[in-house]
Image (tube, rainbow, N blue to C red):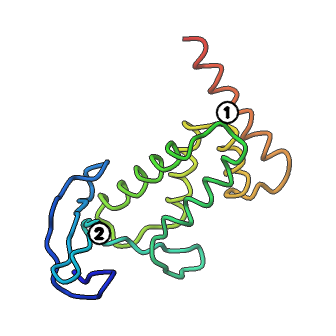
Amino acid sequence: MKCPFCAYTDTKVIDSRLGKEANNIRRRRECVECERRFTTYERVEEVQPLVVKKDGRRQPFDRVKILAGIQRACEKRPVSSDAIEKVIDRLELSFLESGEREIESSRIGEAVMAALRNLDEVAYVRFASVYRQFKDINEFMSELKEILAKGEGHNGG
């Protein structure tokens, strides 16, 4: 590991610990040359699936795009950034564990909607209205009525 201070390539590990979610290792290192200390993080390199867009184009899976969409939907809602991160972590893990090399963008959108529906219904409606591109107010109202009907079922038992 190259020292970030003097660029010397020989460093020694002083301490190693598991990260918060146990998906990375935090290492304290010391440069053999300048004796300064620094921290590195090590994690498994995951092979992300390609996302197949509606027009057939393929692009690498991008966690940041999903994060941006969910953050927009949750704007000014009582949803913590930790809750959003957990949703994205679960989604990303499910796509990785599927073992598929390619995943349709529509599956990602549907998975995000399902997660938002459980997280915050207003955020869900916001995301769905953009994702599903409702053609008119009737389609939008139909979706809202479905949400309200399911909500009533939860209160009754």
User: Based on the displayed image, in which of its 4 quarters is residue 68 positioned?
Assistant: bottom right
Seen from the viewer's position, the closer of residues 139 and 116 is: 116
| SS of the residue under disc 1 | helix
User: Mark 2 packing: few (<14 Cα in 10 Å), some, or many (20+)?
Assistant: some
The residue sitting at 22% across, 63% down in the picture is 27
Q: Secondary structure at mark 2?
A: strand
Check the picture and name the quadrant holding the N terminus: bottom left
Q: Position of residue 78 (x, y in %)?
A: 65, 36
Image: 152 above or below 141: above
Q: Compare residues 13 and 52 and report the one nearer the observer.
A: 13
Q: Quadrant of the C terminus?
A: top right
| Residue bearing mark 1 | 147
Q: How many marks?
A: 2
Residue 87 numbered mark, or none = none
**Mark nearer the N terminus (2 vs 1):** 2
Residue neighbourhood size for the residue with mark 1, other residues' Cα within 10 Å, grouped as few (<14), some (14–19), many (≥20): some
The three-letter code of the residue at mark 2 reads Phe
Residue that numbered label 2 is attached to = 38
Image check: 155 left or right of 141? left
Name above or below for residue 78 compared with residue 102: above
